[in-house]
Amino acid sequence: MCKYPKRPQRRVGEPKIKWWTLTKENAGLIAERITDERAWRRAENADSMWEAVADSIRRSAKDTLGVSRGGGIRMEGAWWWNEEIKEKVRSKKEAYAEFMGSSSEEEREQKRIGYKVAKKVARTAVAVAKRQAFDRL
């Protein structure tokens, strides 16, 4: 069986302001900070005023509410995964490793057929498990 090194996990999204932690008290603090800054008075036209106020709101919210690490929520789809599927996928991977490791042409052809059968069994097991899981919803 081939062992591959694990890749480092990447963050899905960028850090975001924790708007979901906004309460009445936090909203009051943010409003005070925005009015103390008076960003709208420094602007010459409406566009620059809009940008200045938006930046002021973002700064105040970041300081008051905090910022997430940027991981994001990504549903992996493994909630329907079980031991039976895991075993069938493992046997498919082993069959692939044997197929790729074979040297002679006739041995390679036999291993290819074995791999194709294991691949079909694993694909069918995944489809059945997904269908059963979605039917339960």
Image (tube, rainbow, N blue to C red):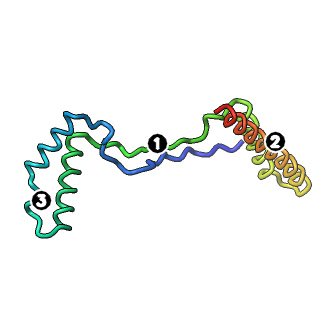
Local packing at callout 2 (Cα closer than 10 Å; few below 14, some 14-19, many 20+) is some
| Of 56 and 74, the residue lying toward us | 56
- Identify the image quadrant of residue 47: bottom left
* Dot 3: element: helix
Q: Nearer the viewer, mark 3 or mark 1?
A: 3
Amino acid type, callout 3: Trp
Q: Which residue is mark 1?
A: 73
Q: Using the image as rendered, state which of residue 100 and residue 126 is in the foreground.
A: 126
Displayed quadrant of residue 129: top right
CB-based contact (under 8 Å), mark 2 and mark 1: no
Dot 1 amino acid type: Ile
Of labels 2 and 1, the one closer to you: 1
For disc 3, the marked residue is 40
Residue at the (33%, 38%) spot, across then down: 20
Ranked by sequence position, the earlier of labels 3 and 1 is 3
Q: Quadrant of the N terminus?
A: top right
Quadrant containing the C terminus in the rendered view: top right
Q: Nearer the viewer, mark 3 or mark 2?
A: 3
Q: Left or right of 22: which side holds 134?
A: right
